[in-house]
Image (cartoon, grey):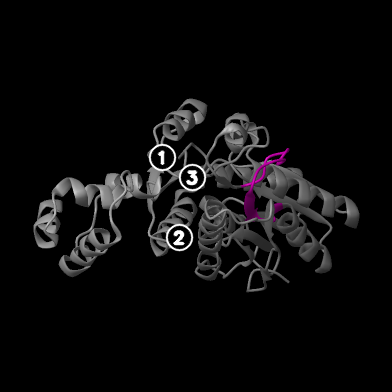
Amino acid sequence: MVKITDVARHAGVSPSTVSYVLSGKRSISVETRERVLASIAHLGYRPHAGARALASSRSNVLALMVPLRSGIHVPVVMQIAVAAVTAARRHDHDVLLLTQEEGVEGLRRVADSALVDALIVMDVQMRDPRLPLLRGLGRPSVLIGFPADAADLTCIDLDFRAAGEACADHLAGLGHRTVALIGSPPEVYERQTGYAQRVAEGFRAAVRRHGMDGEVHPCESSAEAARALVARLLAERPGLSGVMVHNEAVMEPVVRAFRAAGRRVPGDLSVVAICPDELAEHADPPLTSVAVPAEEVGRRAVELLMAKLAGEAVPAATLLPPRLTPRGSDR
């Protein structure tokens, strides 16, 4: 590994002079500066993060806050995280992944440490307690998700309200009159997590608009919970013919439970879902679905953040329109 002393020896200067060239803390003659930079290039010297930070007042590190709380479908979260890390590397940035329930104090600790240049915040609640601090930070941030009040914030996500409407509209267009939304686990609604709230809002709006009979039913992320909910739905709503699922963990258990109860999918029951395409494609039967564009959300969140770091204007709200793909689970 090439050291700063190797650069100094090659350029014929002291190690402190190399440090001053990197940090810009002292005036160095043009001739000496060029000689040092030429030696850096020739030897392939890569200054460590601290030296880069001195030179640019940047750490070249982004914080990605991913509180892995109960009720969250981890594979989708990690798709977003991997996409964000990949996009950050294309901009010569690393990502500090925070997976604990950091909350306000954790956010303040990271922001005050000078470890990161900017922040991406996930699992946004409608009245998220982190928002006042984010608005007052001297560092750029992007939220993956929309709170109830997004003023002075930069947010990106799938338009989950439109996605909920699109699924219910699709069922209405097929002639279904009694429908149900099998939603996220109860704790996700209790936290008022934005995406779950907005899906429910969109579903209810479409149900009212079409004059359908339909309700939202939270469901724990287990096969046992899915079987129990399906049994209750069939007992309480024998005319049920259309189901929307917004809970990746129970999509297949729900279909199996309806089949075990004698309901053919799609012969007797139409099922649509909001989930990543690969989950819908590999289900049995393949599910008609609105895609959760996890990779696109992660990538574009980083692009927004890099534009903000460069001083460029960015849109306050980026809502990705829902894309419904018919497959073999409805008729």
Q: Residue at x 20, y 49 (%)?
A: 17
Q: Which quadrant of the rendered structure holds the C terminus?
A: bottom right
Q: Which quadrant of the rendered structure holds the N terminus?
A: bottom left
| Gap between marks 2 and 3 measured at Cα | 17 Å
Mark 3: few/some/many CA within 10 Å (<14, 14-19, 20+): many
Mark 1: few/some/many CA within 10 Å (<14, 14-19, 20+): few
Residue at image mark 1:
99
Q: Secondary structure at mark 2?
A: helix
Quadrant of residue 153 in the image? top right
Give x and y (percent) for residue 289: 64, 65
Q: Secondary structure at mark 1?
A: loop
| Gap between marks 2 and 1 measured at Cα | 16 Å
For marks 2 and 1 on the same chain, the one whose residue lies earlier in the sequence: 2
Mark nearest the camera among 1 and 3 is 3
Q: Are marks 2 and 3 in contact (CB under 8 Å)?
A: no
Three-letter amino acid code at the position of disc 3: Ala
Mark 2: few/some/many CA within 10 Å (<14, 14-19, 20+): some
For marks 1 and 3 on the same chain, the one whose residue lies earlier in the sequence: 1
Three-letter amino acid code at the position of disc 1: Thr
Q: Work out whether residue 281 can be spotted.
A: yes
* Stretch in magenta: 145-160
**Residue 214 versus residue 288 in the image, above or below:** above
Q: Secondary structure at mark 3?
A: strand
Return the residue nearer the eye: 252 or 249: 249
Q: Residue at x 24, y 53 (%)?
A: 47
| Gap between marks 1 and 3 measured at Cα | 17 Å
Q: Does the magenta stretch mainly form a helix, a strand or a loop?
A: loop
Residue 74: say if magenta. Answer: no
Give x and y (percent) for residue 46: 23, 58
Residue at image mark 2:
83
Res. 118 mark? 3
